[in-house]
Amino acid sequence: MPAAGSRKGETREGCRRGTAQPLLLSSWGRCLRYSVGMTRYLFSGWLVASILFIGCSSQQIVPESMEPLVDRTVSFRDLLASPESYKGRVLVLGGEVLKATRLHDSTQIELLQLPLEDGEEPSLDRQQSQGRFLALQQEFLDPATMVQGTRVTMVGEVSGAKTDRLDDVEYRYPTLVVKHLHIWRVQSYRQRQPGPSIGIFGGMGIGGGSRGGGGFSLGF
């Protein structure tokens, strides 16, 4: 027959085991409520950051007042084939600065044409270029501010064509008078605009966002 002291010990042990389970469940419940609360908090922060990011990145490249004047049916290939046929048309072109020269009454910018991608930003792939063109800025523009390699998006009025030497050949450049010029900021891979990301377990981080970044515009 078991001793009374032994039965009492078993009873106390059983009580300790019985109370341990509710304590464990209570701790787990608190952890779960904390995790859910933190997830909601981080999601709210991510949502605010996303709204701010989208607002900052939605810069107007082509001025709203100029948009009705722009003819987007004319491709650069069309312009290159017959510049005189489109004289007076207002186009939006993207390009990379090759050279800027101060003339007597204007600044001439030689550009390598680049197709426009999302956000009216010129492509980074020079292999997609279809040729070159000249942009004439009739107001003073210091050539030193248009360094080689600068990417621009330009609203310009077609003024005709100009034949000039390109290495050992004659090249006919379409010419446009600058109406508005957006200069894209040069950025490396590490300098890309940040974009928020959120993990399923409540983690939050900052990752790469915009490919090219912003810049500044000049209206003439």
Image (cartoon, helix red, strand yellow):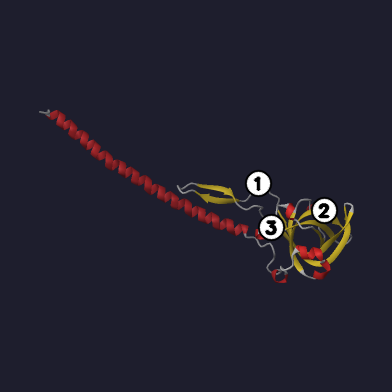
| Mark 1–mark 3 distance (CA, rounded to whole Å) | 16 Å
Q: Residues within 10 Å of mark 1 (few under 14, many from 20)?
A: few
Q: In this figure, which residue is indicated by the disc labeled 2?
A: 99
Quadrant placement of the N terminus: top left
Q: Residues within 10 Å of mark 3 (few under 14, many from 20)?
A: many
Q: In this figure, which residue is indicated by the disc labeled 1?
A: 189
Q: Determine whether, in the image, residue 156 is placed left or right of residue 102.
A: left
Quadrant placement of the C terminus: bottom right
Task: Give percent across and percent down for residue 19.
Answer: 25, 40
* Residue drawn at x 46%, y 48% as measured from the top left: 202
Task: Identify which amino acid the numbered label 2 is placed on.
Answer: Lys
Above-or-below relation of 113 to 84: above
SS state under label 3: loop
Q: Earlier in the sequence, mark 3 or mark 2?
A: 2
| Residue in the foreground of this view, choosing between 40 and 121 | 121
* Residue drawn at x 89%, y 60% as measured from the top left: 104
Task: Give percent across and percent down for residue 97.
Answer: 78, 54
Task: Identify which amino acid the numbered label 3 is placed on.
Answer: Glu
Task: Give percent across and percent down for residue 46.
Answer: 51, 53
SS state under label 2: strand
Q: In this figure, which residue is indicated by the disc labeled 3?
A: 121
